[in-house]
Amino acid sequence: MESFDYIIAGAGCAGLSLVYYLLESDLKNSKILLIDPMGQNIPDKTWCYWAENPLAIHPSASVHYWNDLSFISSKSKITKNLGRLNYFHLNSHDFFESIFKKLEKHPNVIFIQDEVLELAESSESILVKTKSNGSFQATLAFDSRLKQEDFNSDLSLKQIFSGWRIKTQTSVFDPKSLVLMEFPKENSNQFEFFYILPFSETEALVEFTCYSHLEIQEEKLKSALAAYLEKLTGDSSYEISFRESGVIPMSNRFNTKMNTNRVIKIGTAAGWTKASTGYTFHTIQKNCQKLVNRLETQKLENFQFSRSPRFIFYDNILLNIAHKWPGQLEGLFLNLFSTSSADVVLRFLSEETSFKDELQLLGKLRFPIFIKSLLNYESH
Ligand SMILES: Cc1cc2nc3c(=O)[nH]c(=O)nc-3n(C[C@H](O)[C@H](O)[C@H](O)COP(=O)(O)OP(=O)(O)OC[C@H]3O[C@@H](n4cnc5c(N)ncnc54)[C@H](O)[C@@H]3O)c2cc1C
C-alpha cells in the first residue's frame, strides 16, 4: 500500500490552500496525496475577502478590489470608505489554475480523482479508503468533506444565493463602490439582499442572497434576480457571462473539536466559515498558514483553532435574530455600518477586534433587538 506524509480529502479552497502553504514551507518535499471526486474540474466560484493588501496566494494577474462599499435600503444609501482595508475579488478558476501550475513542479504531490469513503485511524497511521483506487496510508489526513446532512438539517440556517456576471450595453454601475447589501423594496418574511460587484460601468456580478432554514428553489432566486436586473438596467439589454449559486451552512456547530490525533478538519467542515456572514476564504488562508507552521515545528498535538467565546456569542445573537426576527436584520446591518467606520466593522466580522473595540462598536447600536435576542439566547 502506498504511503504518504499527508493525505488531503477534498481539493477545494481549503485543500488546495493547504497544499500551497506546504509547498511554500520547509515541508515542500513531503509526499502529499490530494483526493477529490471532481478532479480538477471544480465549478467556478467568486471569492471575496478584505485585507490591506492582496494575499500572496491571490494570483496577481486577477486582483480586483474596491475601497468603498455601499448599503442601499428603500429609505437611504450609505457609502463607506474602507480606510486601509480593501475588498478583494478572486475568481476560483484563476486560483485553482495557479495552484495546479505549482503542483506540476512538484512530483511529490499526487492528485487523484476519487471519492474518500472512510478514514480509519490507528495509533501509527491513518488509512484512507477510496471508492476506486483502494486504500492509502499517511501520517496525517486533512479532511474538508462536508456531508449532505450538513446542508439538509431543517434547524440550521443557510445562506442561499444565486448570481450572474453580466455585461450591459450602457453605463449602469458605479465601479468605485461595491454594494454589500441592497435590500428589496418589498417586505419579505426572510432576510434577503442583492450584492453587486461592479467591475466597470457596464460589467458586474449581481447576486441575490437569502438567509433561510427552508429549502429555496433556485428558480425563485433567479426570478428575483431577473426582475431586479430588469429594473436596474432599464432599456439596456445585458449578456450573462458567468453564473454561480451556492448554499453555505450558517452554524457554529462545525468545529475543530472533531479533530483526532491523525485527522484534522479544514475549511467549512472545520468551522472556518463565519456563521453569521458565510465568509470563509480569509480564515482558510490564516488557518492553513498556522497549520503549516505547526507542522514545521512538529507541534502535532496543537491543531485546535478554538475561537474566542465572545465571537461565538455575538454570532449566536445574530443568528438568533436571523432565525426568529429576520425582518430586523436589515436595520441592524444599516445601524452597524452607519454608526462605526467600515474598517472597524469588517475587522469585527473577521474576529480581529479587541473587547474595547467591541464595546465601542456595540455601544452605538440600537439595543432592543439585541436584548430580545439575549433573553431568547440559543446556540446555533
Ligand atoms: C458560490 C460560493 C461563493 C462563495 N463566496 C465566498 C466569498 O466571496 N468569500 C468567502 O469568504 N467565502 C465565500 N464562500 C464560502 C467559502 O469560501 C467556500 O465555500 C469555500 O469553497 C470553502 O472551502 P472548503 O475547502 O471548505 O470547501 P470546498 O471548496 O467546497 O471544498 C470541499 C471539497 O471536498 C470535495 N469532496 C466532497 N466529498 C468528498 C469525498 N468524499 N472525498 C474527497 N473529496 C470530497 C468537494 O468536491 C470539494 O472540492 C463561497 C461559497 C460558495 C459556494
Image: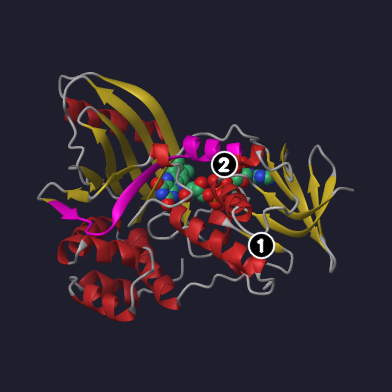
Residue 236, percent across and down? Answer: 18, 20
Nearer to the camera, 144 or 97: 97
Residue 368 vertical position relative to residue 128 in the rendered view, above or below:
below
Type of colouring: secondary structure
Residue 109 visible (yes or no) = yes
Q: Secondary structure at mark 2?
A: helix
Q: Which residue is mark 1?
A: 264
Residue 209, percent across and down? Answer: 34, 44
Nearer to the camera, 30 or 145: 30
Q: Amino acid at mark 2?
A: Ile
Q: Earlier in the sequence, mark 2 or mark 1?
A: 2
Name the residue at the left extreme: 75
**Residue 28, magenta (yes or no):** no
Q: Quadrant of residue 207?
A: top left
* In this picture, residue 372 sits left or right of residue 133: left
Residue at image x 46%, y 38%? 45
The magenta segment: 78-101
Residue 251, percent across and down? Answer: 48, 61
**Residue 98, magenta (yes or no):** yes
* In this picture, residue 347 sits left or right of residue 7: left
Q: Secondary structure at mark 1?
A: strand
Q: Which residue is mark 2?
A: 99
The label on residue 352 is: none
Characterize the local packing of mark 2: few (<14), some (14-19) or many (20 or more) Cα atoms within 10 angstroms. Answer: some
Q: Nearer the viewer, mark 2 or mark 1?
A: 2
Nearer to the camera, 139 or 77: 139
